[in-house]
Amino acid sequence: MPKFLKRILLAGIILFSLAILSWFLISAPVLTSFESNYQPYADKEQLLAHVKKLSDELPDRSIDTEKLNLSAEYIHSEFSKHFKNVFFQEYNANDIIYKNVIAEIGETSCKGIYVIGAHYDAFDGLPGADDNASGVAGVLELARIFSKNPPKCKTQLITYTLEEPPYFRSENMGSYIHAKSLIDNNESVALMLSIEMIGYFSDEENSQEYPLESLSKVYPSTGNFIGLVSNLSNVLITRKIKKYMTEATPLPVQSINAPAEIPGIDLSDHRNYWHFDFPAIMITDTSFYRNKRYHTEDDTWDTLDYEKMAMVVDGVYEAVIHHMDSIQ
C-alpha cells in the first residue's frame, strides 16, 4: 500500500477513534435496561399535591421574602413530618434574610455526604410548576421515602432560595451558600444531585430540542426521557447514576457530560458544587429545550405528568441507595 494511502487510513482511524471517545465521554452509554416489574415508592398524588400547593395555592415565590417564606415554612413543615433534624440555613443578600430549608438524615459520612437539592423560588412571580415546584415536590417525596427506608450514609435533603434571576450566577444563590458552608465545615461530598424541572414530558415527534444541532444527531427527538447533566470531570459517576436509574423504572434516561460553555449545561444549582470541586449532576426534563411554558404564566400544575415524575423520584432514590452501597 502506498505511503500516502497508509497515512490517510491512519488519519481516518484516529478520527474515528476520537469520535467514538467523544461520544463515550459526552453521552455516557450504559449496557443495561429496565427488565423487572416496576413497583413504585413515590406517590404521584403526593407529588401533584405539593406542586399544586407551591405553584397555585401559596403566594408567588420570587424575591419578596414575606411571600417566599410561606413556601419555606411549608417545606419545613413537610420535612418535619418525617425527620427531627430540620432547619433553616439563613443568610443575608442585599440586607435581606433568605432561607434554605434542610433536612438532615443519617449519621455515617461514608466517603462524604449526599446532597439532594432543588430550588423553591420561581421567576418573576410566575407559577413555576415545572420550574421548580416539580423539583421541590420530588425532594419532599424523597423525604417521605427515606423516612421509611433510611439511607446508610449521611444525607441532606435541601431546598434552595435565589436560584432565579437576578441572583443566578451570583454568590447569593442559596446553593452557593450551602456548598461554601460544606467547605467551611470541612465536609466532603460523595454526590450532589440537583433536581431541576422533572415534570414535563411529551411523546410527540420533534418535541425535544438541543442547544447544538450536532446533539440532535445523537439524542432522541422525542421528549419522553429524563436527562442527567454534568461536566467532563464526572463522566464515571454519571454513568453509574444513569445505570442505576435505567434499571429502576421504565422511564428512558439520557445523559450528557460536557463543558459548562455549552448552553444549558450549568443552568442550575449543581454549578455551585462544581465550583468547589464536588461531584454534582443535574436531573432534568431539559427545561426550555422541551417545555415551552418555561418562565411563562402557562407553567401550571395541570400541564405536568405526575406518573413519569414519580418514576424520576424512584430512579433517584434507587440510584442514591445503590451508589451508597458501591462506596461502602
Image (tube, grey):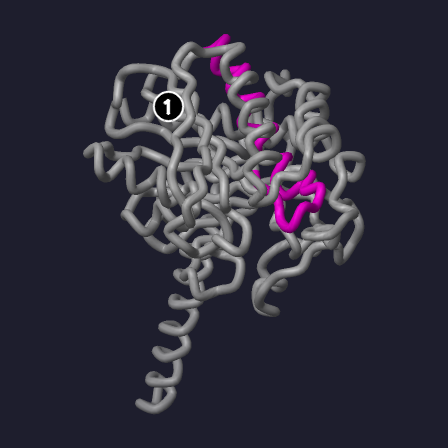
Image point 28% across, 47% down: which residue?
A: 276
Image point 45% across, 33% down: which residue?
A: 100
Counting from the top left corner in percent of width and height, residue 323 is at 38, 28
**Frontmost residue, 328 versus 30:** 328
Query: What amino acid is at disc 1?
Result: Thr
Q: Please, is residue 289 above or below residue 283 in the view? A: below
For the C terminus, the quadrant is top left
Image point 50% across, 45% down: which residue?
A: 162
Counting from the top left corner in percent of width and height, residue 151 is at 39, 16
For the N terminus, the quadrant is bottom left
Image position of 220 (left or right of 320): right
Residue of label 1:
155
**Residue 50 in which image quadrant:** top right
Q: Is residue 134 magenta?
A: yes
**SS for tag 1?**
strand
Q: How many marks?
A: 1
Chain part drawn in magenta: 121-149
**Frontmost residue, 45 versus 93:** 93
In the picture as drawn, the residue positioned furthest to the left comes out as 186
Name the chief secondary structure element in magenta: helix
Q: Please, is residue 33 above or below residue 154 in the view? A: below
Image point 39% across, 61% down: which residue?
A: 21
In the picture as drawn, the residue positioned furthest to the front comes out as 95
Image position of 322 (left or right of 305): left
Counting from the top left corner in percent of width and height, residue 181 is at 29, 37
